[in-house]
Amino acid sequence: MRIPPAILTLLAGMALVLFGLWVGQNVNLLPVDASANAPVYDELFRVLFSIGSILFIGIVGLILYSLVRFRRRVGETGDGAAIEGNLPLEILWTAIPAVVVLFVGIYSYDIYDRMGGMTPLNDHGMHGMQHSEERTWGGISPVALEADGAIAPLPVDVTAMQFAFIFHYPDSDITSGELHVPLGQPVALQMKALDVIHAFWVPQFRLKQDVIPGQPTLLSFTPTRAGQYPIVCAELCGPYHGGMRSTVIVEEPESFAAWVAKNSPNPPAESPTAVQS
Amino acid sequence: MTLSLNPSESLQPQGWLRYLSFSTDHKVIGLQYLVCGFLFYLIGGALAGAIRTELVTPISDFLPRETYNEVLTLHGTVMIFLWIVPVVNGAFGNYLIPFYVGARDMAFPRLNAVAFWLIPPAGLLLISSYFVTGAAQSGWTAYPPLSITTPATGQIIWILSVLLLGGSSIFGGINFIATILKLRRPGLGLMQLPMYCWAMLGTSILVVLSTPVLAGTLVLLSFDIIAHTGFFNPALGGNAVVYQHLFWFYSHPAVYIMVLPAFGLVSEILPVHARKPLFGYTTMVYSIMAIVFLGLIVWAHHMFTSGTPPWMRLFFTIATAFIAVPTGIKFFNWLATLWGGKISLNTAMLFCCGFIVNFVFGGITGVALAQVPFDIHVHDTYFVVGHFHYIVYGGTVFVIFASIYHWYPKVTGRLLNEPLGQLHFWLTFVGFNLCFAPQHWLGLNGMPRRVAEYDPQFTLINQFSSAGALLMAISTFPFLINVVMSASNGAPAGDNPWNALTPEWLTSSPPPVENWHGEPPLVHEPYGYGVTPGELSLEASSGRDLWNLGQGDQR
């Protein structure tokens, strides 16, 4: 006796779904996560990777199966079956992608909200945001920290130009070519460009924001892993675009305070970060 | 005695010379588009080779930095505006649409010739800018203020060239809309047209609606460069982000202008070689129109990391992701077309299946990219480069090759060599995937696009990618040899080697001037495979005879 094809199809489908889920959970294509929103991003990535693997392997499998099963044998003539459509089937395969897309859309909205993306950009009622007169045109505001009410964000002014980033700490009046940030404290970058459009990207933070002349933008993140990570300019900005890189150094609050104390032109009497940590 | 001149015979040169003439024959114009486009494809491919050579090493050592930016700008512009858009619209549209609607030519033959003859001067202008003054350096997107601050002459020539090409595209679009809606043979309904007509109708609507926006934008940009106005120049109070909105209002639909005709061509090729009717004709038509509508309201997904407020990011996420639904319908319909057929796995079919595999991959990464939080990490990285090439090369260019293998016997009356074709396919397929699949990993891990130098940890993967590019370059040779040799030495194809039912096969191969030997055939069922001939409503004298002849040896 033969096993009914419907059972085999069901088993193949289940194996495919399980394999897709396994791939999503176990194949790691991303760099190390070093900010609070990076694990959130990685969660979205794993879900998308699972769904994508199931769809891709399923469709490629169907094609290969069709090409073998329905190939024209040697000497065979004539046509295939004259089937022109199947409305219930077509409704079904319109509905399935619609549901998947809707799910992915709602899920990624949730992810984006958890990353702070839905916080209004120009609501500068929060602490540490002194320069609030100017409109912010894009980016991600500090969020969620407010709920804890724990740590105020460290403000840093970023100036992008051909072909460098300059970081200025308004609290301690330090100007630096590298971005030093303390572990675990939110950082709010107020970003301006002097000449052309640049983009501030730290792959390990999973964050990117264009820096646009004439339109200040904002980017917030909370570093969660000590180390040195590249800051990469991601928007074509001229001949040396590929060389426009810097480094973000995530360090323990104590060593960050020491760095501030060592570099500040003013006496570090009231270093705000040291107080908080 | 009255002197009567038949314009198609007396006023136009005959023989090969007509391909260099201002011919108004749609078949000549179609081939002019194809050959001209292919020459530019070779140039664009050489530029891509230069880019991949530079990226073999992590330091900038092969090209001077300015030259590298000129090369990447030219590569994008040439491939999009001089190869894919003209070929997938102009070449196949001009060759096939009059056959499909049962006409003897396009609605406006002279406008058609004008549309083609704008392309060679525009292309030469663009290429010459490299040698004369230095080409544009700001990428094919030409974002200000970079495009305002880089050397002006190259940028202005780039704008002029793109304006000419956009004009050509609009002329073509108007012509296709008029031909499809107004030149149909009496008795031929819209819902009886071959699917490529619907694809071209949708594409032409996009062309006519969105290309003028690009033209207007580039004129304003040229004012900023020449006359120092401040539309997009923040230093003069302008707004650089407005340019991005206007640019992508054209350039996102441009992706559909490159891809929808390819969908149409696949819908013509698959049923012929699978010997089955196109599955779900009606839903295919509605999905094309849904893609056209949605394609116009998704442009800001190219600007998720730009100056865009949260609500805008959200709206464009949802709109973009929903394009996956009509696109998915088309792919499921093609799979169902294959299912239960009698598939001949020839080169045309191989390239179609390669297209489906590549495009599904590109579509999945596309849905991921549509999600704002996902895009914020990989925007402007090699992930996007990989995704984009899976759509336009793995998608459209694969279909262009499939179409050449499918319609070569129509144009020349001879078949292409099949083993060489299979070699061409496998070299292209392996080379393409080796070149572009690793780029997704590069983007995820920190390599931005449009760079001449990169973090040394990415060296090995970049070398894989460059090796794939080399394979793709090599794959061009079997194709060129095949196309040139088969024109004189290929096996005679007869009029209808595939026993196809779409109207262009119901006349002689190559077709006569004005297409038909008698009245144009009335084809109500262009995909009527698996139906006995008596049930088909083929009312044409010549067409029916040819078709019966073709079917005769099978039964």
Image: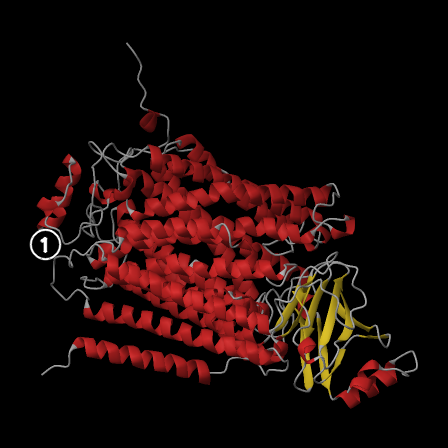
Q: Left or right? Give the position of B445 relative to A248.
A: left
Percent position (x, y) of residue A206?
A: 60, 75
Q: Is residue B407 above or below residue A226?
A: above
**Label 1 residue SS:** loop
Q: Count residues near mark 1 (Cα–Cα under 10 Å), then give few for <14, some for 14-19, many for 20+.
A: few
Question: Residue at image x 14%, y 44%?
Answer: B536
Q: Is residue B171 left or right of residue B186?
A: right
Residue at the image position 60 percent from the left and 82 percent from the top: A33
Q: Amino acid at mark 1?
A: Gln
Residue A121 % position (x, y): 68, 63
Extreme-top residue of the structure:
B1
Q: Residue B27: in sight, yes or no?
A: yes
Q: Mark 1 — residue? A: B554
Q: Is residue A266 left or right of residue A132?
A: right
Q: Between A161 and B317, which is closer to the camera in this rendering? A: B317
Image position of B354 with respect to B179: above or below:
below
On the image, the x and y values in percent for residue B478 come to 36, 61
Query: Given the current orientation, which residue lies at the most extreme right position?
Result: A267
- In which quadrant of the rendered image does the N terminus of chain A lie? bottom left
Q: Is B285 drawn above or below residue A110 in the view shown? A: above
Locate residue A95: give its quadrant: bottom left
| Rendered residue at 37%/71% (across/down) | A56
- Screen quadrant of the C terminus of chain A: bottom right
Rendered location of residue B159, percent (x, y):
61, 45
Q: Residue furthest left?
A: B555
Tally the marks: 1
Of all chains, the one bearing label 1 is: B
Can the viewer see residue A161 in this picture? no
Q: Is residue A187 left or right of residue B479?
A: right
